[in-house]
Image (cartoon, grey):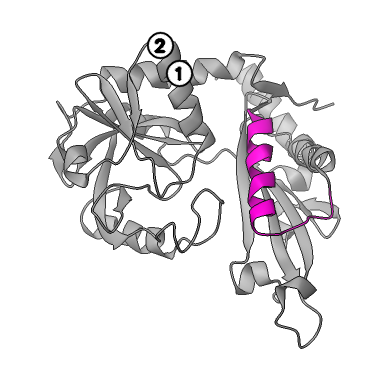
């Protein structure tokens, strides 16, 4: 970065003052993210009775924002949540959070909670649903440096919550299986964890979907997973590039024997995995299918069909 550009960035941060590290929308007003608070009696906090969604801003534009809002609306409908703002207002709130922060690369989250019931009630129908939003600097599951050599993943011993118990297509905060799995992966020398179901089929990890490549064919789980927007993008890109892709059950042993493994997430795009359970994937380097899709994914951010610029003035 040249001195002139560095000075411009420093001025931009200074200009945005208390919002330079992020902005939030809480109780109907915008506040610096460090000042954002959730009421302790909100069932979103007490019971994990909430849904959320996360989009990102890259080089000053939202990527596939309408897809994220579509999923957010579906999740709220499934949980019988009704936020106090409509879709257009939610979009405007997110854009204003980005504008206030001045961030060109950002992680943008919307949340709807059950809220607080009337005193003495344990009936969720008595709650007034609440809406929150925040924007912070872009969050990476694996930063670009780690992506160049690939992540070390561990297949955890914990099973993911069954879809019969909690619908994984509704984005939720039921993460204790993922968090304990992540701690297990660290204990075993890994950097992230991939969970399985009761039949030892791979499912997903903390914030990402999983893909295996064998003989130039991609496979990704069809059950028990969040249907990620980045996952959707990869499926579309594979079709456009003539790469065969199957959505099906993927046994854990198949992942261990794959030629390539990669993850997909809003927090990083297409992320190579080069070891699974300590064993090298393929030749131990990011593979050609993974790299091809990673490049295509970031190029798609310039496509006006999926990009919504933020007006920062």
Whether residue 39 is visible to the viewer of this picture, yes or no, is: no
* Quarter location, residue 86: top right
Disc marking residue 297? none
Badge 2 element: loop
| Residue at the disc numbered 1 | 237
Is 141 placed above or below 79 here? above
Residue 63 lies, in percent from the top left, at 62, 27
312 lies left or right of 45: right
Is 286 placed above or below 268 here? above
Badge 1 element: helix
Is 106 placed above or below 182 here? above
Q: Is the Cβ of the residue at disc 2 closer than 8 Å to that at disc 1?
A: yes
* Quarter location, residue 237: top left
Classify 10 Å Cα crowding around label 2: few (below 14), some (14-19), many (20 and above): few
82 inside magenta stretch: yes
| Residue at the disc numbered 2 | 241
- The residue lying furthest to the bottom in this view is 120
Residue 67 lies, in percent from the top left, at 64, 33
Residues in magenta, as a range: 64-85
Residue drawn at 61 percent across, 31 percent down: 105
Residue drawn at 80 percent across, 53 percent down: 31
Q: Nearer the viewer, residue 51 or 20?
A: 51
Residue 194 lies, in percent from the top left, at 31, 49
Quarter in which the N terminus is drawn:
top right
């Amino acid at each position: 970065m040249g001195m002139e550009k560095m000075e411009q960035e420093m001025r931009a941060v200074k200009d945005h003052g208390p919002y330079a590290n992020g902005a939030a929308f809480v109780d109907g007003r915008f506040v610096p993210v460090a000042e954002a608070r959730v009421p302790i009696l909100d069932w979103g906090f007490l019971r994990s009775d909430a849904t959320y969604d996360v989009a990102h801003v890259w080089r000053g534009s939202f990527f596939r924002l309408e897809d994220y809002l579509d999923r957010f609306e579906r999740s709220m409908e499934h949980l019988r949540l009704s936020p106090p703002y409509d879709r257009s207002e939610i979009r405007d709130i997110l854009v204003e959070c980005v504008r206030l922060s001045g961030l060109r690369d950002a992680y943008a989250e919307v949340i709807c909670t059950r809220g607080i019931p009337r005193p003495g009630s344990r009936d969720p129908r008595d709650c007034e649903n609440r809406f929150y939003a925040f924007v912070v600097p872009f969050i990476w599951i694996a930063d670009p440096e780690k992506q160049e050599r690939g992540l070390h993943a561990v297949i955890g011993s914990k099973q993911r919550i069954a879809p019969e118990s909690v619908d994984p297509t509704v984005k939720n905060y039921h993460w204790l299986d993922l968090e304990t799995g992540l701690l297990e992966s660290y204990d075993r020398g890994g950097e992230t964890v991939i969970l399985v179901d009761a039949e030892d089929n791979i499912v997903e990890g903390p914030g990402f979907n999983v893909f295996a490549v064998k003989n130039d064919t991609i496979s990704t789980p069809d059950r028990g997973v969040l249907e990620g927007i980045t996952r959707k993008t990869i499926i579309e890109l594979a079709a456009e590039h003539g790469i065969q892709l199957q959505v099906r059950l993927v046994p854990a042993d198949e992942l261990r024997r794959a030629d390539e493994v990669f993850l997909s997430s809003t927090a990083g795009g297409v992320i190579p995995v080069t070891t699974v359970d300590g064993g090298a994937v393929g030749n131990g380097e990011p593979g050609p299918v993974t790299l091809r899709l990673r490049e295509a994914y970031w190029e798609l951010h310039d496509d006006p069909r999926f990009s919504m610029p933020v007006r920062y003035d």
